Amino acid sequence: MILPGAKLGILGGGQLGRMFVVAVRTMGYKVIVLDPDQDSPAAQLANRHIHASYTDGPALDSLARECAAITTEFENVPAESLERLAGLRPVRPSGAAVAVAQDRIREKRFLQANGFETARFAVVEALLDR
């Protein structure tokens, strides 16, 4: 269990990240945001902003050293970055889960394989010459 007073990390500093920062700070946690946008909405309210790319190794390592657990605001953070962080701290969702969400074909197949209904779809791998 991660008790209030601990630092939580988040990759991504948009509007959803800002809502995360407001919620967890209200519960007594501190927040570090890693985001490449100097003026990201979440960073404006966070305890600390690491202004860096989502693939910046030293920045990711700094986030991991300082935080008890790490999450992401959206599915477009590189899955590899989440896997790197997971070697040091709990990360939710996992890099593997994010990798599925980043590939719509893989995502549909995953859902079908796990008993979820999806709309019919066809995989288009190449354009036809006309």
Image: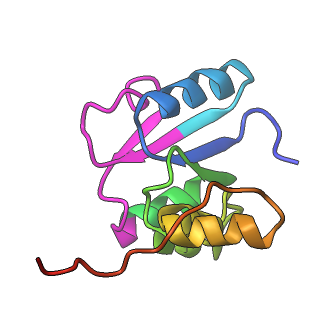
Q: Position of residue 41 (x, y in %)?
A: 37, 26
Q: Position of residue 11 (x, y in %)?
A: 47, 50
Colouring of the image? rainbow
Q: Can see residue 82?
A: no
Q: Nearer the viewer, residue 19 or 106?
A: 106
Q: Nearer the viewer, residue 50 or 114?
A: 114
Residue 31 among those drawn in magenta: no
Find the residue positioned furthest to the front.
Answer: 130
Residue shown at 35%/68% (left/top)?
55
Quarter holding the C terminus is: bottom left
Residue shown at 54%/75% (left/top)?
84
- Compared with residue 77, is residue 130 higher up or lower down, i.e. above or below? below
Q: Indicate left or right for 46 with 40 as reference.
A: right
Q: Position of residue 53 (x, y in %)?
A: 30, 58
Q: Indicate left or right for 44 with 1 as reference.
A: left
Residue shown at 64%/76% (left/top)?
87
Q: Position of residue 49 (x, y in %)?
A: 39, 40
Q: Indicate left or right for 7 with 52 as reference.
A: right
Please tell me in which quadrant of the rendered image residue 83 appears.
bottom right
- Compared with residue 56, is residue 42 higher up or lower down, i.e. above or below? above
Q: Can see residue 72?
A: yes
| Prevailing secondary structure class for the magenta stretch in the rendered image | loop
Residue shown at 61%/65% (left/top)?
108
Please tell me in which quadrant of the rendered image residue 31 appears.
top right
Residue 35 among those drawn in magenta: yes
- Compared with residue 67, is residue 97 higher up or lower down, i.e. above or below? below
Magenta range = 32-58
